């Protein structure tokens, strides 16, 4: 069936599809796998299970990528930090998964990003030598992971002139040059999650946002439709808890120690033209850096911190002024002209779901920066499978391990995971992507679907215009998000399908235009979003 957003495909997510599949799932036949959480790991688990031929329902209390998965550094990295600390297994796994994304499953969303580590007077020659050795070790990791050198060029030393060409904002006094290296970077982390969810939907998985899991058992979950308040049950042979920092609230015995990672959002003029990102050493730390990462939309992200979070876990964490001040101090240590607090256009913070393995009575707790990023798959006494820890780069392996465990524990009829070679929606080899008749910015966001998105704006000039002066996102992209990417309201569009909302002033300026387009696009099937499509279970049960 065609829609104003273009012809629907098996991978298209919409308000109408959500309503139909919610009605089929609640109180319906037993499914093979219920996944709770639709961040990268949960969406990855839904795809992994569906790709094995299992019947899958995946739910999230909010939207796709609502939590940690939209607040990352947008890096798909090779694990150099873990290699330096002796965690060879984590480092190798990261390098392998980076290669999978860049060369097989998502080359449209992940590409090589150059970084320069400026050799300023604050970086001693000894530390520079150590950093250079580490970068060579990282290239060895790339080789061990069988990632082509054409995909990730080797590291090298740069002179002062070349270093300033890559990053003109650097302080010139005492600059000895730089260390240039390459790593993987995402066009956008929330777009990766959207692609995962849509690819799973194309394999038959039912992707249900705004559906909160209230209680988990080994045979399913009691859920609530957050749009209507109605409750019911979804029955499943296996349940996978992939709810990240909220995992402990659904399954007893899972101890999460959240770590906050804060990023600043700067306007393009704050740092001038950046051909490369920056690695800025943190004083007093041998293996931690502040990252400066230019974005395709012109903004620049600066991050990140690693601070423990105590108490209740918020739905959306705030970036505290202490984190903002710390990042500005480290950033300004290498700049010719300082970036001041007033120059910070926005800030965001994400919570890493680190597994607390220290025990309740182990004495002084280690820093969250020192906790392992290795993931764990835990099975409760009731048989619920929980996957925690890890990081964005290794989401696919985490999902595979979780589904492997569910298949084994619950005796599901499924073979091994095929996801290491399964392209996501929009993926194609680089030479195919390069020839698509669409702007490069759209190709890096939509891959092979970019011409269809571009055609929406070509057919209706109003949709071809930016929704915000000076910012590249067009009305066509918003319409595509509503018709094919599961967006249900203006927040989904502003904060996850696009990243307009990362800058509060931009969000406010675009809100009326976005709401108008959302209301118009949903008017045809808006009744499907609000109607009561299934009979609720009595709340007293």
Image: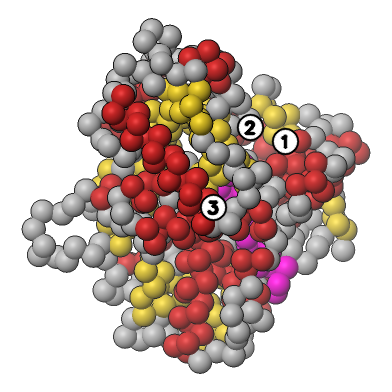
- Please report the bounds of the magenta region as a residue range: 186-204
Residue situated furthest top in the rendering: 173
Classify mark 2: residues with Cα within 10 Å, few (<14), some (14-19) or many (20+): few
Q: Position of residue 67 (x, y in %)?
A: 46, 52
* Mark 1–mark 2 CB contact (< 8 Å): yes
Main secondary-structure element of the magenta-colored stretch: helix
Q: Position of residue 50 (x, y in %)?
A: 64, 75
Q: Secondary structure at mark 1?
A: helix
Distance of label 3 from label 2 (alpha carbons): 28 Å
Q: Is residue 117 left or right of residue 484?
A: left
Q: Quadrant of the N terminus?
A: bottom right
Tell me what residue is drawn at x 63 percent, y 62 percent: 197
Q: Toward the viewer: 334 or 178?
A: 178
Instruction: Kindly identify which residue carries mark 3.
Output: 143
Number of the label disc, if any, that sits on residue 441: 1
Q: Toward the viewer: 400 or 349?
A: 400
Tell me what residue is drawn at x 40 percent, y 34 percent: 132
Q: Position of residue 296 (x, y in %)?
A: 63, 32
| Total marks in image | 3
* Residue 203 among those drawn in magenta: yes
Mark closer to the chain start, 3 or 2:
3
Image: 34 above or below 375: below
Tell me what residue is drawn at x 66 percent, y 54 percent: 103
Q: Is residue 61 visible?
A: no
Q: Secondary structure at mark 2?
A: loop
* Residue 229 among those drawn in magenta: no
């Amino acid at each position: 069936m065609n829609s104003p957003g273009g012809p629907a495909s098996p991978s298209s997510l919409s308000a109408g599809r959500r309503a139909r599949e919610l009605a089929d799932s609640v109180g319906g036949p037993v499914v093979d796998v219920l996944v709770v959480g639709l961040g990268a790991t949960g969406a990855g688990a839904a795809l992994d299970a569906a790709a094995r031929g299992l019947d899958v329902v995946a739910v999230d209390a909010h939207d796709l990528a609502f939590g940690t998965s939209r607040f990352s550094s947008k890096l798909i990295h090779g694990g150099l930090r873990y290699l330096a600390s002796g965690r060879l297994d984590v480092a190798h796994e990261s390098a392998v998964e980076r290669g999978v994304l860049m060369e097989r499953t998502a080359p449209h969303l992940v590409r090589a990003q150059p970084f320069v580590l400026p050799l300023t007077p604050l970086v001693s020659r000894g530390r520079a030598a150590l950093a250079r050795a580490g970068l060579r070790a990282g290239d060895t990791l790339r080789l061990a992971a069988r990632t082509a050198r054409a995909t990730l060029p080797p590291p090298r030393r740069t002179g002062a002139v070349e270093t300033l060409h890559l990053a003109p904002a650097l302080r010139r006094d005492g600059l000895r040059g730089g260390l240039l290296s390459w790593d993987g970077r995402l066009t956008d982390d929330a777009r990766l999650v959207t692609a995962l969810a849509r690819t799973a939907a194309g394999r038959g998985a039912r992707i249900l946002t705004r559906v909160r899991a209230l209680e988990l058992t080994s045979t399913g979950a009691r859920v609530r439709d957050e749009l209507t308040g109605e409750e019911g049950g979804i029955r499943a042979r296996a349940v996978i808890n992939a709810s990240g920092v909220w995992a402990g609230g659904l399954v007893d015995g899972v101890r999460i120690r959240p770590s906050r990672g804060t990023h600043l959002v700067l306007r393009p003029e704050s740092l001038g033209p950046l051909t490369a990102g920056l690695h800025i050493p943190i004083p007093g730390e041998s293996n931690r850096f502040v990252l400066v990462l230019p974005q395709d939309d012109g903004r620049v992200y600066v991050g990140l911190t690693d601070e423990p979070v105590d108490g209740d876990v918020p739905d959306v964490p705030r970036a505290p002024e202490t984190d903002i001040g710390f990042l500005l101090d480290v950033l300004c240590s290498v700049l010719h002209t300082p970036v001041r607090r007033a120059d910070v256009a926005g800030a965001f913070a994400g919570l890493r779901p680190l597994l607390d393995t220290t025990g309740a009575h182990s004495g002084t707790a280690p820093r969250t920066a020192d906790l392992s990023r290795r993931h764990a798959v835990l099975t409760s006494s009731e048989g619920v499978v929980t996957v925690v820890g890890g990081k964005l780069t290794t989401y696919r392996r985490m999902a595979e391990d979780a589904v492997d465990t569910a298949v084994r524990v619950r005796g599901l009829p499924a073979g091994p995971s095929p996801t290491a070679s399964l392209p996501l929606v929009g993926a194609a080899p680089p030479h195919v992507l390069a020839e698509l008749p669409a702007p490069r910015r759209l190709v890096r966001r939509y891959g092979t679907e970019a011409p269809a998105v571009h055609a929406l704006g070509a057919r209706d000039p109003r949709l071809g215009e930016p929704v915000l002066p000076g910012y590249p996102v067009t009305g066509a992209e918003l319409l595509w998000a509503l018709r094919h990417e599961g967006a249900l309201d203006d927040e989904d569009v502003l904060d996850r399908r696009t990243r307009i909302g990362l800058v509060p002033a931009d969000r406010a300026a675009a809100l009326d235009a976005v709401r108008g387009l959302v209301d118009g696009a949903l008017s045809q099937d808006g009744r499907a979003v609000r109607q009561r499509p299934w009979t609720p279970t009595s709340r007293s049960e």
